[in-house]
Image (tube, rainbow, N blue to C red):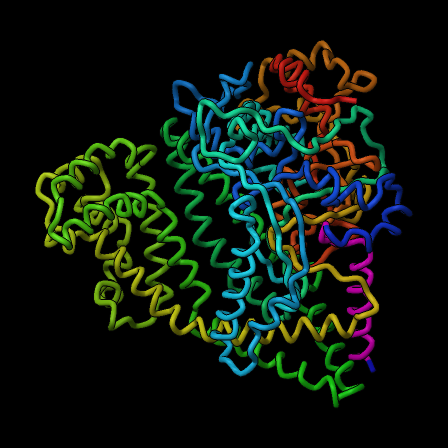
Amino acid sequence: MKKITVMLSFLLAWQLSMADEGMWLINLITRNMAQMEAQGIKLSAEDIYSINHSSLKDAIVQLDDGSCTSELVSAKGLLLTNHHCGIDAIQLHSTPERNLLKDGFFARNLSEELSIPGKTAMILFSVEDVTSKIAKYQNEKLSSADYYTAIYTGMDSIARASTQNGKYYAIVKPMFHFNTFYLFLYERFLDVRLVAAPPTSIGNFGGDIDNWHWPRHTGDFSMFRIYTAPDGKPAEYSTKNVPYVPKRFLNISLNGVKEGDFTMIIGYPGTTYRYSSPYEAMQARDVLAPWKDKVWGEFIRTIKDAQAKDIKVKVDYTDKHDMLVNFWQKDTWQAESMFRFNIVERLKAREDSLRLWVSQKPSTRTKYLSAMPLLDDYFKTYRKNKWEELSNSLDAILGFPVDINKNINACDELFGAMLSGKNVKKAAKSIKKKIPKIFENYHANPDVWLYSTSLKSLIDNTSDCPNIPMIQAIKQQPKIIQMMPLYAQNFYQRSYFTSPENLKRFLKKPAIDSIVKDPIFMLYQSYHMLYDSISKIIRPLQGDYEKAMQLYTKGLLEMEDNKLHYPDANSTMRLTYGKVIGYRPNDGVVCNPFTTLDGLIAKENPKVDVFNVSPRLKQLWQVKDYGRYGVNGVLPVCFITDNDITGGNSGSPTLDANGNLIGIAFDGNNDAMACDYAFEPDIQRTIIVDIRYVLFVIDKYAGAKNLIDEMRIL
């Protein structure tokens, strides 16, 4: 009886946590309108999503195929997003002599806006349910791996047939673990330019110390602009391109917010696991998080040390440092939060309720029981073989440092010529001209330490590899493992791919024999061999896992067919609604929902880099020169809501009941970091920079009147 009572209490907690959550598909938002109207929205579903006339969806932009969200705020294609979403672009144009990261950047006219090679922006045109079209590709007689190969073939086929001769970028996305499918059509723009960014002392105030914490005082914004060909069509960068003319852009409200006000966020959340099994949650909590804490923690210490010693490294590694810190904190704190909120136990209770539901009608429901042991066995196999640690170690060594891989890949043309015996000198000459670009922003010292950490993690988590001699040889020599940094330095010193001088020396007399003896190249090849060998084992198991999750999720949906469900986030446009509200993270602690510039100044600490305050900002505070953005001598900076977001929502617009822009979402709170697995309505919060602070920085701090005049401010 006690066991049943405990289980029911977990189920009750789970159901209560579902009450106000949701990352709702934008095309199905009509289903939520009654609840949204009850909470205060003044718009119709057609105002939010329509393919017949302009709607809010036309003003929401996905950056870089899914990294962040942004929003159109002018008739000339002007975008607002987060500072951390623009950090790579800001860093690209920064040097120690012209440090845009430190000093900020505000273009005074179109000619000053900076090109960002490779940066893209996508605007959603339409969404269509294509589940019935995918059905013909779903052959249950196929093996699991072949089953999903066929489905992906169908998804690609439908997407290719839907581009309207290249007018749209088309992609089919599975929902609810391959139980439904939707076709998304976008306009994809290829010329996106940097317009403005505050200095880091504003855009990243508080740095990794304040990251994921409330209260925050961060002006986390940057600005870009979409350009098109003169005929208005997407085009690669050209000086002849013109600013994009959008179907819709957002009005900006200076009315501000008060506690209890309705808020709505539209954006592109990346990945959630709300339908996961308890076994998957255990894997994230007990395996992935400890690995990240150990290995990525060492990465971060290495980079911080190098940045403290060299301003060039500080500039060139800002993006890498910030990304590592952000996700290291997220995954490690997520594990802590999973313990705090009993996530695994709640998922287990939900699974138990599924078993009970099956037992009530076994003749038609027994099939759902078969998924559970398959899911359990899948993660047991992963843990037994340390595949989580091994796969992540391989990703790390091929991604940190990225420079070695870039340098080797830059020589592909030469390798091809050497193997074919044709145009070797021509290829070598071509690469020699690219050497400055190849080694741009490259720093051997921190890279070798990152490489050493990755390699040691790989060796520590690899079983015997008789088919990969170099890795096997390292494993059999404990001295190498114990003295990995020294051996890694030796590899770097001897390799052609770790300095301009070494590469030039090779290019004078390129030869296959020299390459196959290069230690970094040999290891590089070994990593790919190992990756391929693991993939051959894991791929069939992953197919079985996906098939089990498809069945498991279908069972959960049928069990709760009287409820409105939303699919897990997968970088497709979603809407979440809520309200401005504070919270109580712990006994005796009350978090109010607003912060101000007064609070920012109170945090000032000249001895801590991330708490330095710009003299210009402090001067404006001292004389209370806030213009129309202050309220009774106080300047709002940030506020919090109970909207349901995750990574990818960074830069998403926060809208009031009338659809006006009131802020830019940029973070969550560390008190509820298990949010990808479960929503905690009493404590989970979205952190938003108040649009009035954004406009104050643009206007009063930077004096960029040209940008203020371009926006429609109510």
Question: Is residue 4 highlighted in magenta?
Answer: yes
- Residue beneath the point at 15% across and 39% down: 426
Q: Is residue 659 left or right of residue 391?
A: right
Quadrant of image for the C terminus:
top right
On screen, 288 above or below 415? below
* Nearer to the camera, 184 or 515: 184
Magenta residues, start to end:
2-26
Residue in the image at 52% along x and 76% along y = 544
The x and y percentages for residue 454 are 36, 53
Residue at the image position 12 percent from the left and 48 percent from the top: 422
In the picture provided, is 154 more to the left or to the right than 390? right
Which quadrant would residue 260 be assigned to in this image?
Answer: top right
Looking at the picture, how far across and down is residue 668, in whole percent? 67, 44
Query: Looking at the picture, how far across and down is residue 128, in whole percent?
Result: 67, 56
Which of the 4 quarters of the picture holds residue 440? top left
Q: Which residue is outermost to the bottom?
A: 363
- Viewer-closest of 276 and 110: 110
Q: Residue furthest right?
A: 38
Q: Main secondary structure of the magenta part?
A: helix
Residue plotted at (34% across, 33% down): 441
On screen, residue 677 versus residue 143, left or right, reads right
Q: Would you say 109 lies left or right of 459 here?
A: right
Q: Quick check: 713 above or below 364?
A: above
Residue farthest toward the front in the current orientation of the protein: 165
As for residue 301 lying within the magenta part, the answer is no
Residue 588 visible in rendering:
no
